[in-house]
Image: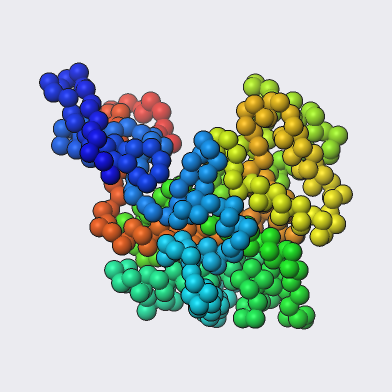
Amino acid sequence: MTDKKATLNIDSENEAISLPTYSGSLGPDVIDVRGLTSKGYFTYDPGFVSTASCESKITFIDGANGVLLHRGYPIDQLAEKSDFLETCYLLLHGELPSLDEYTDFVKIIINHTMVHESIARFFRGFHHDSHPMAMMCGIVGALSAFYHDSLDITDPRHRIISAHRLIAKMPTLAAMCYKHSQGQPFMYPNNNLSYSENFMHMMFGTPCDDPQVNPVLSRAMDKIFLLHADHEQNASTSTVRLAGSSGANPFACIASGIATLWGPAHGGANEAVLKMLEEIGDVSNIDKFVAKAKDKNDPFRLMGFGHRVYKNFDPRAKVMKETCDEVLAELGLEDDPLLKIAKRLETIALEDEYFIEKKLYPNVDFYSGIIMKAIGIPTDMFTVIFATGRTVGWIAHWHEMLGESVKIGRPRQLYTGAKPRDYSPREGRPAAAKEVF
């Protein structure tokens, strides 16, 4: 915080309006505009892209320089030296755990991976070809009907129990979505496996076989979870905070985040990468599609290149590229037609002057989509896996918000509709000029 002031001059005001200016530990200063309301003004910021809606200590992004920090730790260091559950502890508690704290945390998560048997029956209400995200929205919201013992959001202990349950059960529920779509029996969690190994076991295992999880693939899945764990005040995180500000229970809040993530503009980017590769179809078509991408008058876009936030490079992409190379080598898929297209596009993006000048580098969605395709995960499951990793970020922001003085979210608007007018009888009323929808 600082004592600096910003001055706003408005033509209709006799005096300038003085507004406090605050400094965080990193990033640009922010102007506190709350005092404008008493002067009869609101600010106008569609999409809230220039508005700090909260104060947070969890994640910092410097898009211009390709920086992503979780509680101050660079994402590349966490991806190289940590694992998903240790990063979960960091996001929830603010510090990396000691060995004993880490061991205890892992045990807690493992002990919460089971779900109530009634939830298995809940899945039977979904058609076999239901979209997995539709199932996840419904199932996660329904968890509040099973865990009445920890729904007091004013109690920090209840909040952390809910956090543990959500982190632990999301992989189980995600795998159940997949199994339901395949008509296969659900697989129970195995407490002898790690978090990511367990997910792979529940996704691809059957009751006929002992757990057989490829360590290279489980490490890749752990990286995917870790690199998607949090990304500051994005659309889904802001939705979770807004829902939480009303006092909604944690399961309902996380379900709202899942619903927002389902939107193709948010969580569907890695799925869009695979659809693009399928549209290109063959390596021989790449030059034609690259030319289309460079043509300003052509609506075609290369998905998985560049990023709305990162104007230089996506710091998560380098880690994902290394993991992608490991997975393809392990599975011997260098000759897979779609993956050959992806690798050729990657080379072009890293060498072509057009892509370099516009900083259209491959991003995390490009590589994670390729990895999940190689592992054998269908594209409609990609966003479910994204939600599984992002749950800890959502719950950390929810927990942080409730630890402060909570004010229910209430965005304002610039009203441009009709001015006051009198009601007229239906008889003799002219037809409406146009439909609203």
Indicate whether 147 appears above or below 84.
below
Number of marks: 0
Q: Is residue 425 left or right of residue 74?
A: left
Of 76 and 301, the residue lying toward us:
76
Q: Residue at x 64, y 33 (%)?
A: 360
Q: Nearer the viewer, residue 313 or 128?
A: 313
Is residue 256 rendered to the left or right of residue 157? right
**Image coordinates for residue 223, horizontal then vertical, percent:** 63, 59
* Snapshot quadrant of residue 425: top left
Q: Is residue 437 left or right of residue 333?
A: left
Res 112 visible: no
The color scheme shown is: rainbow
Q: Is residue 79 above or below residue 177?
A: above
Please provide percent x and percent y for residue 170: 55, 67
Q: Is residue 173 visible?
A: yes
Name the residue at 45% across, 56% down: 71
Q: Residue furthest front?
A: 98
| Residue 4 locus on image (x, y percent) | 24, 35
| Near-viewer residue (283 or 6) | 6
Q: Tell me which residue sits at (76%, 81%) in the image.
A: 210
Locate residue 177, reporting x and y percent.
62, 66
Pick the quarter of the image with the N terminus: top left
State which quarter of the image contains the C terminus. top left
Q: Nearer the viewer, residue 115 or 80?
A: 80
- Residue, x 53% and y 38% (percent of image)? 65
Is residue 115 toward the left or the right of residue 175 in the image? Answer: left
Residue 162, picture quadrant: bottom left
Q: Residue furthest top?
A: 11
